[in-house]
């Protein structure tokens, strides 16, 4: 069943209105007709609205609500991925997969070893594209919300942003002891805010790790092998998802 997002004001009683690019996609690409059942979320609450297409117009599709599925498909904690800006289009892949794994928000971070430097104009274009990728991934994985992709932060801004969160993890290749990593993951419980910091290519500098420790982030190992930036975060999110879903 295909899944779509609408704004809360597009849900009125037992009527749900679909507008924008989804209209063309439904009609021209998916070739849906009246009577087709679809699912809809408002992007804010975890509710899933099951409905049937009733009317198809040029710029709007009217659906009739059948029932509301209130089972919460989101993770029981909010996981924030602070991702060091990677090269090329790796960020697009990271965002797509992080959304599938249940991340709550993604924060691009300009750290010392970030090769990518974005001008204001280019940054806004990138952010818009990344948010579109997050929305598409949320549809595909039938998320109840669209995870937020925030503006690029400096490393210090990212540390400040994570300051009040309950658990703050920073994988570091010089850290030791998988038993400690397992212990930290095993303590994660519902309702927490969890920050995961991932460095760009080349990882974090010693200075940045010291700054992180001062901000009460916990350096952890992810094993004996060095992982790429686009791999490390997804593995950590997978471990967190396994713990929270268990």
Image (spheres, helix red, strand yellow):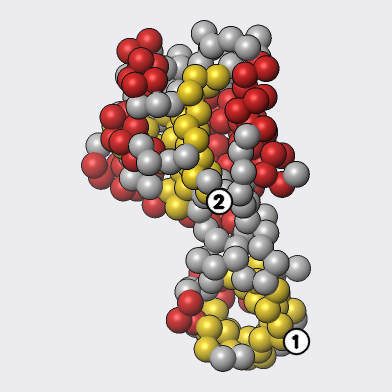
**Dot 2: within a 10 Å radius of its alpha carbon, few (fewer than 14), some, or many (20 or more) residues?**
few
**What residue sits 54% from the left and 68% below the top?**
45
Dot 2: element:
loop
**What residue sits 58% from the left and 10% below the top?**
176
**What residue sits 62% from the left and 71% below the top?**
47
Looking at the image, residue 176 sits to the left or right of residue 141; the answer is left
Give percent across and percent down for residue 154.
29, 32
Q: CA distance from mark 1 to mark 2?
A: 39 Å
- Using the image as rendered, state which of residue 13 and residue 188 is in the foreground: 188
Give percent across and percent down for residue 39.
68, 73
Work out whether residue 63 can be spotted: yes
**Dot 1: within a 10 Å radius of its alpha carbon, few (fewer than 14), some, or many (20 or more) residues?**
few
**What residue sits 31% from the left and 47% below the top?**
124
Dot 1: element:
loop
Residue annotated with mark 1: 35
Q: In which quadrant of the rendered view does residue 225 lie?
A: top right
Residue annotated with mark 2: 191
State which mark lies toward you, 1 or 2: 2
Image quarter of the N terminus: bottom right
């Amino acid at each position: 069943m295909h899944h779509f997002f609408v704004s809360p004001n597009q849900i009125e009683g037992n009527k749900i209105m679909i507008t924008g690019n989804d209209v063309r996609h439904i009609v021209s690409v998916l070739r849906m007709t009246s009577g087709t059942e679809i699912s809809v979320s408002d992007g804010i609450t975890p509710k899933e609205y099951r409905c049937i297409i009733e009317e198809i117009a040029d710029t709007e599709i009217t659906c009739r609500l059948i029932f509301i599925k209130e089972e919460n498909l989101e993770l029981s904690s909010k996981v924030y991925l602070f991702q060091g800006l990677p090269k090329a289009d790796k960020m697009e892949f990271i965002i797509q997969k992080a959304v599938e794994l249940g991340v709550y928000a993604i924060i691009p971070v300009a750290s010392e070893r970030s090769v990518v430097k974005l001008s204001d104009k280019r940054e806004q274009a990138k952010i818009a594209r990344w948010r579109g990728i997050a929305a598409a991934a949320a549809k595909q994985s039938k998320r109840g919300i669209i995870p937020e992709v925030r503006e690029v932060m400096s490393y210090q801004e990212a540390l400040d942003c994570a300051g009040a969160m309950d658990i703050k993890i920073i994988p570091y290749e010089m850290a030791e002891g998988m038993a400690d990593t397992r212990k930290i993951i095993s303590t994660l419980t519902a309702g927490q805010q969890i920050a995961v910091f991932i460095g760009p290519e080349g990882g974090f500098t010693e200075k940045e790790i010291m700054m992180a420790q001062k901000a009460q982030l916990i350096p952890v190992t992810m094993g004996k092998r060095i992982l790429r930036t686009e791999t490390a975060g997804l593995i950590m999110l997978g471990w967190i998802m396994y713990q929270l879903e268990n």
